[in-house]
Image (cartoon, coloured by chain):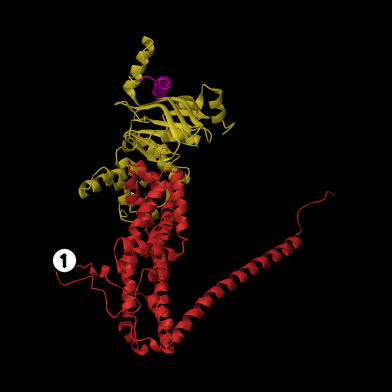
Chain colours: A yellow, B red
């Protein structure tokens, strides 16, 4: 039993080694045979779903992200941790071009989405196209002041699905996917604002899931919830990995440890360290990571 | 023993009772001012009702103006006012809302939109007679709309546009950023976010703004006199609804008209004392119409607030 766990951890570590620094859009570079073998092994288990390459980001003249290189493995949960203002949310919001809603922001570098190698932050890429492929769940549950059904159906309607049967089917599927179907199946036509905070957040997750995104972004999804609602959402996130690649920003290190496969530690706009979560929390390579994890600052 | 800085219980109680007295004083002043204002309005209203009491009756609503005070009524004025309000609302709502959406959701923030914004706000302060002069030159002489319901509606629509625009922008702005982000995050375009979310959620505020604008327009006299409203009209505009296809008739737009404030002005300026009662009765009705519109605005706001709470 122990051996299996160890092997899994070791695998993750090896894969993580390839996560930082991979910059080529054409898959792993091959400087030496052994590294290439490792890469192939890792990519068989979890090919990269997206990779940030030399990503810089500015709010006006203030550089918020500095040269971020990070690979997001497919069907895994990658957590972003770091003290307030370190740029983790800024980084997350690059993935669905939320910054484009604000004036005077600038991207440089790339976030390549695999396998079709679209640069998510490229000026040639339509932000709406990006948002149709990458879903997002926000810090505070933000359901529309409409019925539960209409909340979940909205993304589908935007995609031109208006057939009643199909809508009903896919809404149910999405609500089941977010483990809230049983709680709301009799209240589909009630306002989503009448639900509890945790239920609202799961409706928001359903809403994002309904459109079957390739990556689902979570921006501190439980920071406004009580421990029980938080536990439900965390359990859900770990289950979601089978369906979708997850990237989550969290302030809560226990949460990162509980839900994620990989953890990236950011500080002052830079990516300090990324590794398998078990490795980061037990044996971080960098002093700064260790200081943060042991609560010496942040 | 070291000097302690904290207060004794007596000192706390003494200080607190004094501060509470100030609190009560403020409440008293506030209430006095509030009832003072309401009282003036009430006195005005009851004075009008008393002076006009002899005239209230079905005949007053169904009679045209007349040379004899006891035969005169407000039929043409009331119908004229309603038709003008209809035109004003139908013009001011779409134009005002569209302008507000553009300014709030689409316009880039630069010096040009800055100037437009300042001007929109300033327009709200332009004296209404100026709008009347503009309308006389533009609508009556230039476009040849005549001294008609259409001209009056256009003029008053211009007059209340700033009110509608400012109220609409305020209302659009009150839709939280989180809701917009949620919609954008699902892949909505700017127009989809506006039409599916921002507009429906701010309908209450927009309608309230429109009605407050209309209740200002309903009492406007100066611009309507300027464009040449007649004060003695013994006919009604053609009916908007007809028995024959296509069942709608727009002739009424070109019809000459009179309106409630004009009728009042006309009656007040007559030497015959009996007409003063008519003016008072019409005034009470006009005031009642305004209060009713404001009540509708409050009701709409309440209904939408109840449905949507952020």
Residue at the spot 35% in from the left edge and 71% down from the top edge: B228
Please provide percent x and percent y for residue A207: 33, 44
Instruction: Determine if residue A117 is in view.
Output: yes
Q: Which range is magenta?
A: A1-24
Residue at the spot 46% in from the left edge and 61% down from the top edge: B126
**Residue that numbered label 1 is attached to:** B246
Pick whichever, A5 or A182, lies toward us: A182
Viewed as shown, does residue B125 lie left or right of B157? right
Please provide percent x and percent y for residue B41: 50, 76
Viewed as shown, does residue A91 lie left or right of B196? right
**What is the quadrant of residue B279 in the picture?**
bottom left
Pick whichever, A129 or B278, lies toward us: B278
Residue at the spot 63% in from the left edge and 67% down from the top edge: B26
Residue at the spot 38% in from the left edge and 70% down from the top edge: B224
Please provide percent x and percent y for residue B232: 33, 79
Principal secondary structure, stretch drawn in magenta: helix
Is-magenta flag for residue A5?
yes
Instruction: Determine if residue A258 is in view.
Output: no
Q: Is residue A120 above or below residue B40?
A: above
The chain letter under disc 1 is B
Q: Is residue A142 above or below residue B153?
A: above
Kindly give the residue lying farthest to the right in the view shown.
B1
């Amino acid at each position: 039993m122990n051996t299996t766990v160890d092997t899994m951890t070791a695998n993750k570590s090896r894969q993580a080694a390839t996560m930082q620094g991979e910059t080529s859009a054409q898959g792993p570079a091959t400087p030496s045979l052994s590294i290439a073998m490792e890469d192939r092994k890792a990519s068989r288990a979890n090919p990269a779903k997206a990779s940030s390459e030399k990503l810089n980001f500015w709010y006006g003249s203030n550089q918020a992200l500095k040269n971020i290189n990070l690979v997001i493995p497919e069907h895994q949960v990658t957590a972003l941790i770091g003290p307030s203002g370190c740029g983790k949310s800024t980084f997350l919001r690059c993935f669905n071009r939320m910054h484009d809603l604000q004036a005077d922001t600038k991207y440089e570098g790339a976030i390549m989405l695999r396998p079709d190698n679209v640069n998510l932050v490229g000026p040639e890429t339509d932000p709406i196209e990006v948002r149709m492929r990458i879903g997002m769940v926000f810090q505070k549950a933000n359901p529309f002041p409409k019925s539960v059904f209409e909340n979940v159906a909205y993304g589908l309607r935007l995609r031109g699905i208006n057939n009643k049967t199909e809508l009903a089917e896919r809404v149910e599927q999405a609500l089941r996917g977010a483990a809230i179907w049983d709680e709301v199946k009799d209240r589909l036509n009630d306002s989503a604002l009448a639900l509890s905070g945790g239920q609202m957040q799961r409706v928001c997750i359903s809403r994002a899931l309904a459109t079957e995104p390739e990556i689902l972004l979570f921006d501190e999804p439980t920071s406004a919830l009580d421990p029980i609602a938080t536990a439900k959402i965390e359990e859900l996130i770990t289950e979601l990995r089978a369906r979708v690649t997850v990237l989550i920003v969290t302030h809560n290190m226990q949460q990162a440890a509980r839900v994620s496969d990989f953890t990236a530690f950011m500080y002052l706009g830079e990516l300090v360290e990324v590794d398998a979560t078990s490795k980061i929390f037990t044996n971080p390579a960098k002093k700064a990571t260790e200081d943060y994890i042991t609560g010496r600052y942040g | 023993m070291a000097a302690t800085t904290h207060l004794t219980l007596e000192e706390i109680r003494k200080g607190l009772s004094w501060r509470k007295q100030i609190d009560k004083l403020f409440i008293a002043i506030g209430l006095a001012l509030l009832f003072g204002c309401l009282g003036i309005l009430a006195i005005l209203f009851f004075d009008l009702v008393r002076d006009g009491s002899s005239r209230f009756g079905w005949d007053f609503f169904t009679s045209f103006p007349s040379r004899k005070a006891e035969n005169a009524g407000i039929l043409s004025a009331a119908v004229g006012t309603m038709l003008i309000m209809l035109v004003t609302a139908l013009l001011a709502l779409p134009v005002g809302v569209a302008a507000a959406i553009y300014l709030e959701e689409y316009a880039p923030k630069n010096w040009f939109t800055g100037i437009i914004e300042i001007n929109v706000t300033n327009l709200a302060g332009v004296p209404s007679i100026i709008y009347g002069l503009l309308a006389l030159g533009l609508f009556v002489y230039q476009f040849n709309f005549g001294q008609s319901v259409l001209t009056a509606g256009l003029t008053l629509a211009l007059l209340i546009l700033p009110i509608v625009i400012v109220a609409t922008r305020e209302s659009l702005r009150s839709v939280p950023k989180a809701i917009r982000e949620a919609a954008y995050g699902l892949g909505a375009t700017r127009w989809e976010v506006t039409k599916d979310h921002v507009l429906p959620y701010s309908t209450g505020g927009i309608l309230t703004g429109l009605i407050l604008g209309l209740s200002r327009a309903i009492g406007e006299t100066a611009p309507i006199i300027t464009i040449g409203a007649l004060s003695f009209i013994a006919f009604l505009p053609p009916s908007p609804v007809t028995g024959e296809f296509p069942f709608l008739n727009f002739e009424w737009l070109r019809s000459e008209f009179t309106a409630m404030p004009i009728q009042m002005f006309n009656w007040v300026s007559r030497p015959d004392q009996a007409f003063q009662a008519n003016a008072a009765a019409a005034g009470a009705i006009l005031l009642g119409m305004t209060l009713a519109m404001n009540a509708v605005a409050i009701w709409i706001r309440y209904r939408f607030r109840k449905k949507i709470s952020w």
